[in-house]
Image (tube, rainbow, N blue to C red):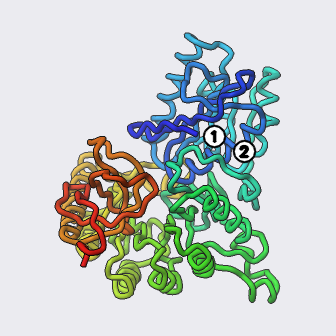
Amino acid sequence: MEKIIDEKKQGEALLLNKSDKNKRKLFIESYGCQMNFSDSEVVASIMASEGFNTTNKLEEADLVLVNTCSIRDKAEQTVRKRLEKYNAVKQSHNKNMKVGVLGCMAERLKDKFLEEEKIVDLVVGPDAYKDLPNLIKEVDAGRDAVNVILSRDETYADVSPVRLQSNGVSAFVTITRGCDNMCTFCVVPFTRGRERSRDPQSIIEEIDDLVTKNFKEITLLGQNVDSYLWYGGGLKKDFEKASDMQKATATDFAKLLDMVAIKYPKLRLRFTTSNPQDMTMAVIDVMSKHSNICKYIHLPIQSGSDRILKEMNRQHTREQYMELITNIKKRMPECAISQDIIVGFPTETEQDHKDTLSMMEFVQYEYGFMFAYSERPGTMAARKMEDDVPQEIKKRRLSEIIDLQQKHSGERLEKFIGQTVEILIEKESKRSKEQWSGRTTQNAVAVFPKENYKVGDFVNVKIDSCTSATLIGHAVDYSENN
């Protein structure tokens, strides 16, 4: 199994078994969050069962699917440019090529996509992928096809994903879908629906399969993994209506994480994404107890200002977030933390911006994902708030946020120098064919000479130096470590 990932476009082209030349060919690209990439693996599996081989060559595709992100306008514009590319290829190579749009952008725009983009034949929301075979038949019959109905229970637990975007070492396992948080800036609750969790037994079965295939690391995935709650099925919001027996035997995220860590002691475990209000001390205690759970948490803050957090409908305060960080550092001093920050949210003042900078100084994040506010149609912010922060101010504030994060990231990496850390080899270094590249438990990228090691090996590496983004070291044996 092979794959191609275009990192500039955050897209992917996925290659399946090409032994049967009579099968139709599918080209699929994914944009946006890790959930979209995981969903594309589900789609590839469903389409493979319908006789589609997946190709890395757009020009030979009979069906092109693009899995879209709608969280920012820039992401949507990127997809529209890709549709222009598909149209050009269709006109020059295969006039019978069909084009489908999947994911959050499809859910948000629905039938409008067919009106706005004449090349689009198929529009499918995140909960409707099992209906793809029927929709393809509609398209084959010359009719446009749309299914964007949000589900109350779809988790794709019964679909075995085709591990196409994986390196054979690490993989995603989706445990929840949807989000109940209703942040005023976010379209996810409208494009992915309410929170529902997956049966823990099906999660274990999927991990069993990955372990059998010699995967070394898995990431438990969801819009909000800390909200994971299995009580026999149903939406999280309906848990209060559950029976006493269901409540007594329910599995929350801390229990699930503990269960997986105990059952697979040699498997590295990660999870994403967390929300501050839902991360419990029980989860932190489980992380600190198990060495195979990576000491890294992506914990979006969005703003360091209490006033802006309230405007965003974030369910935590500045003080509560700082208390959570303090507790994490107390139990796991080595734990790395990353952030999401939005600058220029409606009504953001210079003092609000300074509050965010001071929060960054308090936490000293290892990594960050920082963006200027982009109004998203359909959200509460778009309906009720004026996008009143001028672009030049957004740009300046974003630059200050990025500069501070780069400073902190560099300082955190420098602290690794002289230490010996465990690296899981994932791939060859981009800059040198003589070096391997992998990550520490804190998610820091490290490179070191290949020697006799191979992809998938855990290697002790002594860090000699670093760049602004990468640790540089050499493999060491036990005697050198001591």
Note whether residue 306 is visible: yes
The residue at the point 65 percent across, 33 percent down is 17
359 is higher (above) or lower (below) than 280: above
Q: Give the image location of residue 276, x and y in percent.
A: 46, 75
Instruction: Give me the residue at 53% from left, 68% from top.
Output: 267
- Identify the image quadrant of the N terminus: top right
Mark 1 to mark 2 CA distance (whole Å): 8 Å
Q: Is residue 2 left or right of residue 161?
A: left
Q: Amino acid at mark 1?
A: Leu
- Please, what secondary structure does the residue beneath circle 1 have? strand
Quarter containing the C terminus? bottom left
Residue occupying image coordinates x 24% and y 46%: 392
Q: Is residue 63 left or right of residue 426?
A: right
Question: What is the x, y in percent for residue 283?
Answer: 52, 81
Are there few (<14), some (14-19), or many (20+) residues within 10 Å of tag 2?
many
Q: Position of residue 135 (x, y in %)?
A: 78, 34
Type of amino acid at the residue the image marks with label 2: Tyr
- Residue 157 in which image quadrant: bottom right
Mark 1 and mark 2 lie on one chain; the one further toward the N terminus is 1
Pick the residue in front: 86 or 163: 163
Relative vertical location of residue 380 with respect to residue 5 in this rendering, above or below: below
Q: Which label was assigned to residue 332?
A: none
| Dots 1, 2 in contact, CB < 8 A | yes
Dot 1 alpha-carbon crowd within 10 angstroms: few under 14, some 14 to 19, many 20 or more: many
Q: Can residue 178 be seen from the camera position used here?
A: no
Residue for badge 2: 129
Q: Secondary structure at mark 2?
A: helix
Q: Is residue 100 shown left or right of residue 431?
A: right
Residue hosting label 1: 102
Along the line of sight, the residue nearer the viewer: 386 or 122: 122
